[in-house]
Amino acid sequence: METTTKIEVLRTRDNITSHFSEEDQHALRQFYAFLQLYHEEVSEISQVEMAKHPILGPIIASIPPAVMELSKRRSDELMANAILHNDWEPLLKDLNAQSLQMAKLGLNFQSLYGAIKKSLQTLENKLVQHFENDLEKALPAIRGIRIYLDVILENFTESQLESQRHINEMQQESQTNLKNAQNEFIYVASHNLQEPVTNIISILRELDGLLTKDQLDAETQELFAHLETAADIMNMLILDLLNYARIGSMSIQSKVDLNLVVKSAVTKLSNSGETLASKIKIGPLPSMI
């Protein structure tokens, strides 16, 4: 006999209802009746399974017994109302809230679903024993267990996907805000640095115009040349920072000739005033995006 069922779950923003055939409803009631009969054993297994979880266990242990008892009583009432009166909306919304809370803690739905499934497997074993291994008699209640698990699994899966989308959106927004803040800082810092460097370059060039070569010895002339080169390089670096900040939030791509990049780097090294102990050999380089 087929032990699975197709469940049509109609979901709108404010309404979650499930529609079952009469056979499904009968199976669910059979399951619920035996759940009440073996409630203590099933509840004990569920608690043990949850206590084993490295994250769920400590959280549950920290909840005061009175609060835990109240929560269990509410869950039992919601389950009874769903199965006996076919009013699934409050139960599914409660499970949805639990799933979303678990997602915020970094848990997936399997943590809670696994504990529920384990406890209901215990109930299946009890059913087989109750009917003295007559599977035909136990099958309606077992079918009800499978239907109930299907409903929970579908609800948890959708809740987890919804919460994960929300978390991903928040992370993306946070990364975008951080990148924008970094680019703004770079822009402001480099813009403030540009003014004094520009002033230094202007002063050096003004001095170069006022002083003739006859007034400066060779060493001083070389020193002025190094100062002007260093100031120009610093100004170029600041402009590069400004350009980086401007395009940091854009998806603009362009080709870069690596030959020009290396040539610029070698020029900066040669203008640093330091004597290189080795020779630099450069072959043909490609352009990159």
Image: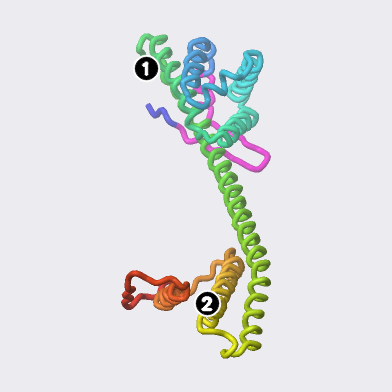
- Give the percent coordinates (x, y) of residue 59: 57, 23
Left or right? Give the position of 63 relative to 37: right
- Give the percent coordinates (x, y) of residue 87: 63, 28
Left or right? Give the position of 55 relative to 130: right
Left or right? Give the position of 41 relative to 208: left
Which disc, if any, is residue 135?
1
288 or 120: which is nearer to us? 288
Does residue 26 show up magenta in the picture? yes
Q: Residue at x 54, y 20 (%)?
A: 29
Q: Earlier in the sequence, mark 1 or mark 2?
A: 1
Q: Residue at x 51, y 38 (%)?
A: 157
89 or 283: which is nearer to us? 283
Which disc, if any, is residue 226?
2
Question: Which amino acid does the dot numbered 1 rest on?
Answer: Leu
- Colouring convention used in this rendered image of the protein: rainbow
Q: Residue at x 33, y 73 (%)?
A: 280
Question: Which amino acid does the dot numbered 2 rest on?
Answer: His
Query: Of helix, strand and loop, which one carries label 1?
Result: helix
**CA gap, disc 1 to disc 2?**
95 Å
Q: Which residues are magenta?
A: 5-31
- Give the percent coordinates (x, y) of residue 105: 56, 33
Q: Quadrant of the N terminus?
A: top left
